[in-house]
Image (cartoon, rainbow, N blue to C red):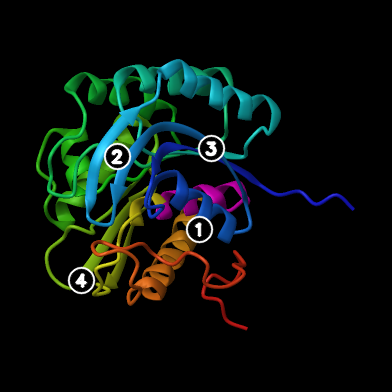
């Protein structure tokens, strides 16, 4: 009997330390019983101590990678991470227009951990005008929400306003991530145009958080591909990310901000906590 696997295309940068980017996406999609295809936007030189270099690929090559996957594998969902520059953003948008996909999850890699912009203003404008109107869900952290909205996003109340504004402006669901909130209480805010949901949890104290945003967004894309409604896909992905952070919190891989541990168990989407 033929066995159908959902296919998720990750459009993102390559991480030489394999904790984030394309590598984290492949691990996540595979752990959740999907098939991962890729279109690499950039090659980065990095490890757990930091990024030493970023080398964007030619925009046309990014588009050709996407087209090759679209024409043959016909993905059920697309996850977009690092886009790099205005030309690559335009190419991604053009391919998505020619090959529509029902579920597109965008994790906007726009700002460094310290809050510095990683993109030109022109590239950010291209994201706003060309890419965001084509996505199903956008998952900015606090810094990225500030850049997209051009106003401060510092508190949970700010996050609620930001989620509503992004959803209404770009006609897509929004998950504003609160990993940079101060204190021991964590909160992500989800808004789909109808209901506002807060995902609250205690902070897991660990130095190993490299690739958290990539992992969460690719998990959501995989659950959407498997047929879960948007809110349930986000809820399942939040459960998964908590488990993989917990599983990796005591790992010693590298000398800095280490990776998560993606392969907890054979992941059953109907049993995200992994109970027998």
Q: Position of residue 173 (x, y in %)?
A: 39, 42
Label 2 vs 1, first from the N-terminus: 2
Nearest to viewer (mark 4 / mark 2) = 2
Which one is nearer the viewer's eye here, 117 or 275? 117
Left or right: 10, with 42 as reference point: right
Quote the CA–CA distance across marks 4 and 3: 35 Å
Circle 4 SS class = strand
Identity of the residue drawn at 42% across and 54% down: 215
Label 4 vs 2, first from the N-terminus: 2
Circle 1 SS class = helix
Label 2 vs 3, first from the N-terminus: 3
Residue 128: say if magenta: no
Q: Position of residue 54 (x, y in %)?
A: 28, 34
Nearest to viewer (mark 4 / mark 3) = 3
Label 4 vs 1, first from the N-terminus: 4
Quote the CA–CA distance across marks 4 and 2: 24 Å
Q: Which residue is mark 3?
A: 38
Q: Which residue is mark 4?
A: 185
Quote the CA–CA distance across marks 4 and 1: 22 Å
Label annotation for residue 109: 2
Residue 222: say if magenta: yes
Left or right: 71, with 116 as reference point: right
Nearest to viewer (mark 2 / mark 3) = 3
Label 4 vs 3, first from the N-terminus: 3
Identity of the residue drawn at 51% across and 47% down: 221
Label annotation for residue 86: none
Q: Which residues are magenta?
A: 215-229
Q: Which residue is mark 1?
A: 232
- Label 3 Cα neighbours within 10 Å, binned few <14 / some 14-19 / many ≥20: many
Quote the CA–CA distance across marks 2 and 1: 24 Å
- Label 2 Cα neighbours within 10 Å, binned few <14 / some 14-19 / many ≥20: many
- Label 4 Cα neighbours within 10 Å, binned few <14 / some 14-19 / many ≥20: few
């Amino acid at each position: 009997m033929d066995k159908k696997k959902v296919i998720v295309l990750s459009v993102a940068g390559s991480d030489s330390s394999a904790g984030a980017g394309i590598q984290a996406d492949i691990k996540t999609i595979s752990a959740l019983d999907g098939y991962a295809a890729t279109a690499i936007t950039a090659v980065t030189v990095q490890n757990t101590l930091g990024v030493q270099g970023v080398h964007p690929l030619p925009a046309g090559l990014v588009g050709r990678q996407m087209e090759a996957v679209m024409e043959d594998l016909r993905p059920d969902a697309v996850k977009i991470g690092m886009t790099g520059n205005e030309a690559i953003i335009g190419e991604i948008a053009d391919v998505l227009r020619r090959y529509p996909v029902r579920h597109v999850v965008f994790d906007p890699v726009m700002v460094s951990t310290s809050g510095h912009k990683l993109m030109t203003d022109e590239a950010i404008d291209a994201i706003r005008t060309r890419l965001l109107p084509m996505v199903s869900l956008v998952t900015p952290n606090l810094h990225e929400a500030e850049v997209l909205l051009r106003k401060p996003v510092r508190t949970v109340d700010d996050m609620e306003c930001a989620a509503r504004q992004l959803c209404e402006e770009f006609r897509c669901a929004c998950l504003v991530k609160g990993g940079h909130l101060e204190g021991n209480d964590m909160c992500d805010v989800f808004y789909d145009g109808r209901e506002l949901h807060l995902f609250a949890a205690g902070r897991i104290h660990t130095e190993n958080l490299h690739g958290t945003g990539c992992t969460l967004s690719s998990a959501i894309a995989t659950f959407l591909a498997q047929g879960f409604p948007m809110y349930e896909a986000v809820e399942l992905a939040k459960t998964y990310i908590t488990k993989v952070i917990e599983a990796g919190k005591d790992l010693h891989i590298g000398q800095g901000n280490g990776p998560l541990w993606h392969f907890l168990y054979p992941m059953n989407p109907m049993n995200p906590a992994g109970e027998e």
